[in-house]
Image: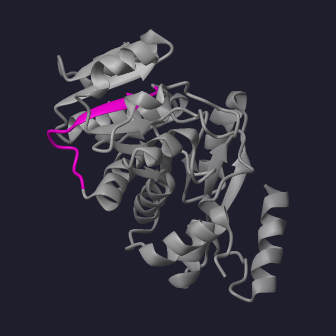
């Protein structure tokens, strides 16, 4: 932690924006790996915009160290933390209290210390729903959704679709048991349907689908491929990839080639971050400032 804090102090002092002192409130993000995270830029821009003496720091936390790290959040009087891969599901059992929606989603990505208790929330579902509305002017109600992947993000997205009234949610995963577990978590017979993540299985349902969501990590590297047949894609399909770096994954290229409406995961990252900010601070987030800082951090200064 000391190295991260010194780096942040140097950056903030040199920028002339704020100082770190005994009253500085600390939040951050735990993950492994964590060097790629753009969340510090987004949240620290928000704190600067509202002239808040807060700082957001990234922490590399191994799976085996999560319990101790979360105890440290409480011990060091931090306000809270975000949790990213691979900690979201494991964290549920480590909370003193879990918000009802996070219970249903089966994952925690935002922790706040309240009365010395660790309280877990999940802002991924909220961020996804807001992103879909922002990008496509869609709500999830009555929609037919195909979600690729049944990990932490896939689970949150699939269950959020059910909570918001989706008609059908197909969950495609290479490990059938994980998709079946989401079906049990959702608790609505016939709404969540697990299928294999294969071309044949996807071909059988994609013609019924309004929205296709990639919630796997496939696409993070240029060589990654979901190996989906390009012929599966049509112009009336909405395609959302939760990956935001690179800005255009193979999946989005396939969608773009047929004129399908598509977007990457930067908007979901933004809106889940906005919700976390508001949980911690009890203030309205400066959305425009957070959006610009996030874009700059991920894609560089447009100037």
Q: Is residue 272 left or right of residue 207?
A: right
Res 115 visible: no
Task: State which quarter of the image contains the C terminus.
Answer: bottom right
Residue 101 picture location, percent across and down: 30, 40
Q: How many marks?
A: 0
Residue 256 picture location, percent across and down: 45, 48
Give me the residue at 41% from left, 21% from top: 172
Give me the residue at 40% from left, 59% from top: 275
Q: Nearer the viewer, residue 212 or 14?
A: 212
Query: Against 48, is 135 above or below?
Result: above
Q: Is residue 194 left or right of residue 50?
A: left
Q: Is residue 127 left or right of residue 298?
A: left
Query: Against 41, is 3 above or below?
Result: above
Residue 104 picture location, percent across and down: 31, 32
Give me the residue at 40% from left, 65% from top: 278
Colour option used: one colour
Task: State which quarter of the image contains the N terminus.
Answer: bottom right
Is residue 140 on the magenta stretch? yes
Res 274 visible: yes
Query: Against 12, is 295 above or below?
Result: above
Look at the image and give the residue range highlighted in magenta.
138-149
Residue 107 picture location, percent across and down: 44, 34
Q: Is residue 293 left or right of residue 10?
A: left
Give me the residue at 35% from left, 20% from top: 203
Q: Nearer the viewer, residue 159 or 200?
A: 200
> Looking at the image, which residue sits at the far bottom?
16
Q: Nearer the viewer, residue 90 or 133?
A: 133
User: On the image, which quarter does residue 186 sit in?
Assistant: top left
Q: Nearer the viewer, residue 276 or 232?
A: 232
Is residue 205 on the magenta stretch? no
């Amino acid at each position: 932690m000391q190295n991260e804090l010194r780096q942040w102090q140097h950056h903030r002092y040199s920028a002339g924006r704020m100082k770190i002192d005994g009253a500085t409130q600390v939040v951050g993000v735990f993950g492994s790996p964590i060097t790629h995270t753009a969340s510090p830029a987004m949240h620290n821009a928000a704190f600067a915009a509202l002239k808040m003496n807060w700082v957001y720091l990234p922490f590399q936390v191994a799976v085996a160290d999560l319990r101790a790290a979360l105890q440290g959040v409480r011990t060091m009087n931090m306000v809270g933390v975000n949790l990213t891969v691979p900690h979201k599901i494991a964290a549920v059992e480590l909370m003193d209290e879990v918000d009802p929606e996070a219970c249903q989603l089966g994952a925690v990505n935002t922790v706040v210390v309240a009365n010395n208790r660790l309280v877990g929330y999940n802002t991924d579902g909220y961020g996804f729903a807001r992103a879909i509305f922002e990008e496509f002017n869609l709500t999830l109600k009555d929609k037919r959704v195909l979600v690729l992947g049944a990990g932490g993000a896939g689970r949150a997205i699939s269950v959020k679709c059910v909570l918001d009234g989706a008609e059908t949610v197909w969950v495609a995963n290479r490990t059938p048991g994980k998709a079946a577990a989401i079906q049990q978590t959702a608790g609505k017979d016939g709404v969540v349907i697990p299928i294999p993540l294969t071309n044949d299985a996807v071909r059988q349902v994609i013609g019924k689908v309004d929205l296709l969501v990639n919630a796997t990590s496939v696409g993070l590297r240029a060589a990654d491929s979901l190996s989906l047949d390009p012929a599966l894609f049509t112009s009336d399909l909405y395609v959302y990839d939760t990956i935001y770096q690179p800005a255009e994954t193979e999946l989005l290229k396939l969608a773009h080639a047929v004129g399908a409406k598509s977007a990457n995961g930067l908007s979901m990252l933004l809106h889940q971050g906005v919700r976390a900010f508001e949980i911690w601070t009890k203030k309205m987030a400066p959305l425009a400032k957070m959006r610009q800082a996030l874009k700059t951090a991920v894609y560089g200064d447009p100037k």
